[in-house]
Image (tube, grey):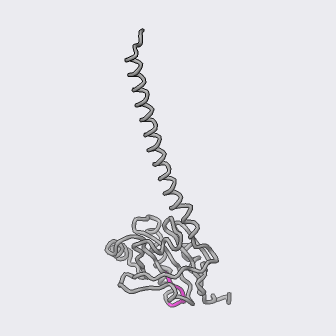
Amino acid sequence: MCVTKKGVNKLSDRAKRKQRRLIMRTTILSIIALSIGYVFYTNFIQADTNRVEVGDRAPNFALMNMDGEKVELDDYRGEGVFLNFWGTYCPPCEEEMPYMENQYQLYEDEDIEILAVNVGENEVTVDRFVNRYQLTFPILLDQNRDVLNAYGVNLLPATFLIDEQGEVIKRYIGGMSEQNVIDFMELINPAPNEDGG
């Protein structure tokens, strides 16, 4: 086989085009990989630095409830607060709501409050859910996820138990059993129980 000068130039041009495509593909893949890395960093690693932990003072917030009234966490100073972040699209959230309602009814006359913060959903969707489960405890709307972010929550459901001084005494991520809810309500009950404890 004889290769002419013209044939060598064609091979050389083809090789150069292949090399340029390889460089372009590598550059694009690198940009994509860096973008994905940045997203993971900002959503998982960096968010943990803002995370509210046990022993921290619970960040105050003000949100609207389902009646259009402003509710502020600091208004519950002197009471135990069961702060729950949830969404209608979250099956574990849906499962724990009746347990929370049962405990809300039991502790209605005590210095304990359940505040259920819905994350990122519109009022109509939340209202349908509340009516379906006949929930009577305060439902707050965090449509912009500001409070969710202030508490450093990445997964739903998430529950924070806050004592009467406003200190976080427990942080629980994931669905709760009925026994969990019962135990958590006892933890934040500022009133002594019958055995004097």
Judge whether residue 137 can be spotted in this image: no
Q: In this picture, which residue range is highlighted in magenta?
A: 109-114
Q: Is residue 157 magenta?
A: no
Where residue 142 sits, quadrant-wise, is bottom left
* Residue 83 seen in render: yes
Of residue 162 and residue 38, the one placed in the foreground of this image is 38
**x and y percentages locating residue 68 in the rendered image:** 35, 84
Q: Is 150 on the left or on the right of 124, as rendered?
A: right
Q: Tell me which residue sits at (51%, 65%) in the image.
A: 154
The residue positioned 44% from the left and 71% from the top of the image is 145
Q: Which quadrant is the C terminus positioned in?
A: bottom right
Q: Residue furthest front?
A: 5
- The x and y percentages for residue 109 are 50, 90
The residue located at (45%, 76%) in the rendering is 117
**Quadrant where the N terminus lies?**
top left
Left-right relation of 21 to 186: left
Pick the front one: 158 or 191: 158
Count of numbered labels shown in the rendering: 0
Quadrant in the picture for residue 128: bottom left
Q: Does residue 33 sit above or below 126 in this rendering?
A: above
